[in-house]
Amino acid sequence: MQELFQQLANGIAWGSIYALIALGYTMVYGILRLINFAHGDVYMVGAFAAYYLALATGAGGAAASLPMALLVLLGSMLVCALVGMLIEFLAYRPVRRSSRLTALITAIGVSLFLENVGLRVFGADPKFFPQLIPPKRITLAGGIMVTNHQITVVVVSILLMVALTLFIQRTKTGKAMRAVAFHRDAASLMGIPVNRIITITFAIGSALAAAAGVLVGLTNPKIEPLMGIMPGIKAFVAAVLGGIGSIPGAVIGGLVMGVSEYLVVGYVSSTYRDAIAFVILILVLLIRPAGLLGRNVAEKV
Amino acid sequence: MIRSLRPLSLAALLVAAIALMAGCAKQSNEIVIGEYGSLTGTTATFGISSKNGIELYLDNLNAAGGIGGTKVKVIVEDDQSKPEEAATAVNKLVDQDGVIAVLGEVASSRSMAAAPICQQSGVPMISPSSTNPKVTEIGDYIFRVCFIDPFQGQMIAKFAKEKLGLTKAAVFRDIKNDYSVGLASYFTDAYHALGGTIVADAAYSEGDQDFKAQLTVIKSKKPQVLIVPGYYTEVGLIARQAREMGLDVPMVGGDGWVSDKLIEIGQDALNGCYHVNHYWEEDPNPAIQKFVTEYKSRYNAKPDGLAALAYDAAGVLTSALDRLRTEDPAAFKALLGPRNDAQKSARAKLRDRIASTKDYPGVTGRITLDAARNAVKPAVFVGIKNGKYEFVAAVEP
Amino acid sequence: MSPRKSSFARGLRWVAAALALSLGVDRLAVQWINPYFYRILVLCGLNVMLALSLNLVNGITGQFSIGHAGFMAVGAYASAAFTVYAVPQLFGVGPDASGLVIVGPLLLALLVGGLTSAAAGFLVGLPSMRLRGDYLAIVTLGFGEIIRVVILNIDAVGGARGFAGIPRRTDLAWVIAGALTTWVVLRNVLRSYHGRAFLAIREDEIAAEALGVPTTRYKVTAFVIAAFFAGVAGALFAHYTYLHTNSFTFMKSIEVIVMVVLGGMGSLLGSVLGATVLTALPEALRFASSERLIIYSLLLIVLMIARPQGILGKTEGKRGK
């Protein structure tokens, strides 16, 4: 029984990472109906941006402290927001009115580009992510062992998700984002600067992916340029599971993905760890395509 | 009918264009050898390490005048971490570039793809790090300078059972990596034969970042030792996460652990762990110190096991070439010439010289090639204490 | 002469000509070009089969399949297992056999590979009933990954160590015959009534459904046919070079996609062109091998932005417009 709770605890910490990445997917899909294949690689860029920032500022060694860690986090979020906006402007905007297959292939191209430029620039060898916060083992009730890093991951994720929800629900820009997601042309007719809203959406989604990258660097301090492929796909499945376009859905989807991955690896077989994501996807799409929290959007003829 | 011919003629034209661009092997004053490795793709880091090791050795050799005045040139081809590309690369090296010997590869699957081509063409091939016994079984032109899985698996089993005195082991292998799978299976057999029990057998995939799910299960089976026959790229994280979960038993691994990244990533989590190494880093042997220092200054990192083995593969090949030069100068000269029967028999003689390698002083140990063309050399077990290596035991073959 | 008889005779003449061509080119190649170029021709022919078959799904029917390497893997491993385990028992043809006696067993192995892969294609095509484009893409991607993981866990076919012991039976003649067959079959499908149905689904699926085209049946059929030929290509591959799952990763699927996109989605000749260029060019540009993937990715992006119809466009020749 203790083993089960241990798996659940680890699964929740890991699932928070998926949730953060899934948020970016769901926001972009809601607005553009595009699976941003490159999103997982933006997560990777975030981890590396934080890595170089930490090395440059010494945040990983002598100067390790909470304010420095926050600085690194915000710095990498900023870098990735810029990267996301650049990708949208250069690669996705020209194909916005093209067919879905065209846009999908463009996204695959961007993803490949980021991965291979990363391999070239950062090098193929894995790097050790500096310890922004010194690690500590913590024993919870029932003998469950977690680390302070895992708790940090869950807390930061919750904070970011709450901030995002408040932003979407309470601010004018957030309202504009919801409008563009609902009906792009009508929103444009209402005077909403659609291009700018899309750019902002990409910026926020990419920043969240960067945060996920930094948090992963904390708990699993090995980073390499191909690290974003699998988490990206799984986060996409999480977004679909929760209901694509729904922000609380992405959160729930991420947690479910994390926990089920742990349960499958622990009790079924570790070789099917990646396969479970696709099985979940197929099940969701066949049984309830709108996802857990999504609305069923009828296809207009 | 005509339409069906068009695509074919297009293909033929393109290939002909490439043929025109290519030169043909001609008389030169350099020994030309080939190297194939995964310089791109998922295992790029291993291919690049090997390339560095070979490059370092050959540059030093050429700077000192080469083999009796003849320089050695190496043509490097990338196989993108794919077996079929390894075969294509070796085809190019052997048939297009006319190399007289080939160095490569790390992954046994890629060596298996390329070896038949070398064997068929009579071009000696030395693999620096392929550990699957089947590689050298392909033919008598195929050699290796590393341990084979059965030997290393048995060494690790003996070490865990007899030196550490631990009878209950958990095995955690990389299901996607042939080195890990092979080593794990030979370890398991040997450990059973020595009377040990395997209480847990779990798997991960190379590239995985999170192992806590499997470690939770392993912990519940209460092993006394955790055997991780994988590569350093994952072992550091595995050690950290194991300790984070309260799994504090010693971990033992093979030569795939060898890299300065191991302790960089694993840090204190690796205290009390052991692994097989080819050399003992603080070994006062000047050749080893020279290698480590030069590699570090040139490539900004301490050499990993793959670089060291590649360095020795280049050394074994060139020392065999040197012996050929002194014992049969005519044959050596033929190696510099075009691809003809004289060169073919010269390559056969080179093969014989390689096969008779005895006590070659490599940085990975004194290498002797046995009748199965595998390396026979002592191994070293090192332990990690306070983030530093310490010598534990040497195992004679 | 009655029409039926003449078309049969024509078919027979075609088969004879194709065989003569395949064998002739192979003998010439063995005689005149070095093994390296020979190998490139073989790999080129296999890629032609893969690109043509993927074109049926992505280009002609407008579906999103990005796991094509999975079908190749299924065909490769199924045929290899057949040759290694079943053929010696059934036909007494061991791995060292050579000459005419291997023709039958190899043909059978190719069929086994193709049919197993076609069955897989059926399974993958089924979800297309409910799934919209992007989601179908992820499912096909997932299939490619799952099939690799499953194969890695089957010890009987080698797992992570690869499948050793498969006799090398494929040569350029077989590959050319395979490529020609794929080309002719797909070209005939495209020209037929069924071809128009596939194209209709690509252009506007809802309108096609409204006009009475059984879209799901056609979509699944596209997957099945494409998977069959990919499986045969995989089977030929397995009997040519060392078999290991690392040859069937997502990267391989992407390479085939680039070939189809470059040549023109919907143009069969374009797929042949794309496959040829993208097999031969990386060999010629080996010095730039570390930049190869960066170039591919930029190529994809630029093509999609500037010329999404590829070199030869979306339709075959003058037909259609």
Image (spheres, coloured by chain):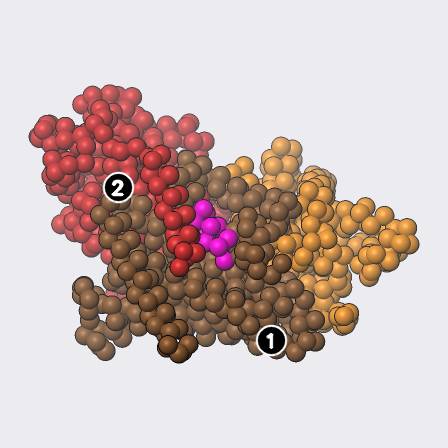
Chain colours: A orange, B red, C brown
Q: Position of residue A104 (x, y in %)?
A: 63, 55
The residue mark sitting in front, 2 or 1, is 1
Q: Where is residue B269 in the image (x, y as percent from the top left)?
A: 49, 50
**A82 relative to C50, above or below:** above
Residue A93 seen by the camera: yes
Q: Position of residue A289 (x, y in %)?
A: 68, 72
Residue drawn at (40%, 39%) of the image = C284
Q: How many residues crowd mark 2 within 10 Å: few (<14), some (14–19), many (20+)?
A: many
Q: What residue type is labelled 1?
A: Thr
**Residue picked out by circle 2:** B95
Q: Where is residue B235 in the image (x, y as percent from the top left)?
A: 45, 52
Q: Disc 1: which chain?
A: C
Q: Who is closer to the viewer here, B6 or B122?
A: B6
Residue B149 seen by the camera: no
Q: Disc 2: which chain?
A: B
Q: Who is closer to the viewer here, A98 or A228?
A: A98
**A46 relative to C231, above or below:** above
Residue drawn at (21%, 54%) of the image = B138
Please give left or right for residue A157 compared with residue B247 in the image.
Answer: right
Residue drawn at (70%, 76%) of the image = C210
Which image quarter holds the N terminus of chain B?
bottom left
Q: Who is closer to the viewer here, C237 or C32?
A: C32
Residue range in magenta is C268-278
Q: Which amino acid does label 2 sit on?
A: Asp
- The disc placed on residue B276 is none
Q: Who is closer to the viewer here, B14 or A283?
A: B14
Residue drawn at (19%, 29%) of the image = B336
**Residue picked out by circle 1:** C216
Please give left or right for residue B221 compared with residue A295 in the image.
Answer: left
Q: Which residue lies furthest to the front in this view?
A: C1
**C200 relative to A71, above or below:** below
